[in-house]
């Protein structure tokens, strides 16, 4: 694989350390390079119950969280390729709820202090998160729009979009990057463009062609024993991880809202199929799901410096990355890795994927412990260091 076997043992040591300290009951690392695959799994599916005796494996089902976003963007691009959608056309025809939008004069100000939107929202804006609205990190009661934005929750997609469209945007369309909401809108757009549910369209256009049989918005009853338990960060009093969602929880039944922003479950095997297709220019095991030009477009940085002036995120957020379609793109190398040009994205529960074309490398880490992103925890720095220090040629 082009790794030092002695040095590669440090990846497993990192996984073992996080299991041994009780941070997670189990974790998995999958590395693919030069056509070969190395999988390291440590621990079990849960701290308690039947999962405490079930080892993490390549077919363990994990909640992807925001690692869903790149798969959703790929599905949208299949609709661009067959000319069902166009990147720079307004989405008004299929999403009339987002036509003739208004924009807040002050993003932190009252909801009735508005001006008309200067341009319509396009598919490109949804893919690059520059549509003018998104996640607003704020304490309750401090920013009116943050309190008003609808969560996906247990409401139908059409109702969610109606509520979102009734609110003003925070910025003019195309002006700023704002996280998350674009992917949830994409799900509604894909459903309406294909005339089927979002999940069915995703299966038909991406998952089935790539053989991703365990990727979807819920888990069949017969497969629930393979679903790892998800934990909150900590119990405030004891510091002990608390169950956030178990195998009999929300993924045990189809959701009312199929969230493109973070609703998928998958396995290491399935995500490797998607990652391999991206690294190979859109084809996996002879099955082409995207053209090479589409993959190049998806994995290029589309943001201007002005668009990277992020609302509500830390000022240095885009110092080392840009944004493609549904994923980040590495623009500067500051650690051992990833290299410039690497692309991918993490999820809330600890599902992380990046492709590094310069090293012909796919790296996937999977665990189920809620956190605030891969850049905020030292464990991710250590895991990436362990991968890149093992590269031998």
Image (spheres, helix red, strand yellow):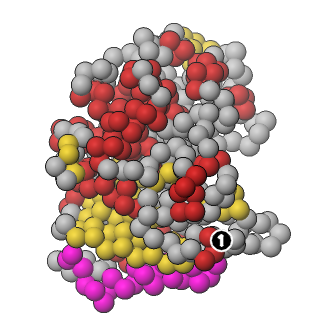
List x then y, in percent, for residue 182. Answer: 48, 32
The answer to which image quadrant residue 282 occupies is: top left
Q: Is residue 384 visible to us here?
A: no
The answer to which image quadrant residue 81 occupies is: top left
Write the residue at 40% across / 62% down.
268
Q: Is residue 308 above or below residue 268?
A: above
Write the residue at 75% across / 72% down.
239
Residue furthest bottom in the image:
6
How crowded pointer 1 is (Cα within 10 Å; few <14, some 14-19, many 20+) is rated as few
Label 1 SS: helix
The residue nearer to you, when weighing 75 against 336, is 75
Residue 185 part of the magenta segment: no
Q: Is residue 2 above or below residue 166?
A: below
List x then y, in percent, for residue 18. Answer: 56, 78
Q: Quadrant of the N terminus?
A: bottom left
Q: Quadrant of the C terminus?
A: bottom left
Name the residue carrying label 1.
50
List x then y, in percent, for residue 156. Answer: 62, 27
The answer to which image quadrant residue 39 occupies is: bottom left
The rendered magenta stretch, by its main secondary structure, is classed as helix
Write the residue at 48% across / 16% down.
95
Q: Is residue 33 visible to us here?
A: yes
The residue nearer to you, when weighing 199 against 363, is 199
What are the residue bounds of the magenta stretch?
1-24
Would residue 366 appear left or right of 37 to someone viewing this image?
right
Write the residue at 31% across / 74% down.
38
């Amino acid at each position: 694989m082009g790794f030092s076997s002695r040095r590669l043992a440090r990846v497993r040591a990192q996984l073992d350390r996080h299991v041994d300290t009780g941070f997670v009951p189990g974790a998995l690392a999958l590395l693919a390079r030069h056509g070969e695959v190395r999988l390291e799994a440590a621990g079990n599916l849960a701290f308690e119950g039947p999962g405490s005796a079930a080892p993490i494996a390549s077919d363990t089902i994990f909640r992807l969280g925001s690692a869903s976003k790149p798969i959703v963007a790929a599905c949208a691009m299949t609709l661009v390729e067959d000319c069902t959608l166009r990147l720079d056309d307004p989405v008004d025809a299929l999403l009339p709820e987002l036509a003739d939008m208004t924009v807040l004069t002050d993003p932190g100000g009252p909801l009735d202090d508005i001006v008309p939107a200067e341009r319509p929202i396009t598919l490109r804006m949804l893919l690059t998160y520059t549509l003018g609205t998104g996640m607003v990190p704020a304490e309750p009661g401090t920013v009116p729009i943050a309190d008003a934005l609808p969560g996906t929750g247990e409401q139908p997609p059409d109702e969610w979009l109606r509520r979102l469209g009734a609110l003003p945007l925070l910025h003019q369309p195309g002006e700023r990057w704002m996280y998350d909401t674009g992917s949830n809108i994409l799900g509604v757009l894909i459903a309406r463009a294909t005339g089927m549910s979002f999940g069915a369209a995703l299966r038909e256009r991406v998952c089935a062609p790539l053989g991703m049989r365990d990727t979807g918005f819920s888990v069949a009853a017969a497969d629930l024993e393979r679903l790892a338990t998800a934990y909150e960060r900590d119990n405030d009093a004891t510091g002990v991880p608390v169950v956030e969602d178990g195998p009999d929880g929300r993924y045990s039944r189809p959701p009312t809202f199929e969230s493109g922003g973070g609703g998928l479950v998958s396995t290491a095997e399935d995500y490797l199929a998607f990652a391999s297709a991206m690294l190979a220019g859109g084809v996996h095991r002879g099955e082409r799901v995207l053209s090479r030009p589409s993959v190049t477009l998806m994995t290029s940085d589309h943001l201007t410096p002005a668009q990277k002036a992020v609302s509500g995120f830390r000022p240095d957020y885009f110092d080392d990355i840009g944004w493609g379609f549904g994923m980040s793109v590495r623009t500067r190398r500051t650690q051992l890795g990833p290299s410039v040009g690497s692309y991918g994205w993490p999820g809330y529960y600890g599902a992380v994927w990046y492709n590094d074309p310069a090293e012909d490398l796919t790296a996937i880490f999977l665990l189920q412990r809620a956190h605030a992103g891969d850049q905020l925890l030292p464990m991710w720095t250590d895991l990436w260091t362990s991968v890149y220090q093992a590269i031998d040629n």
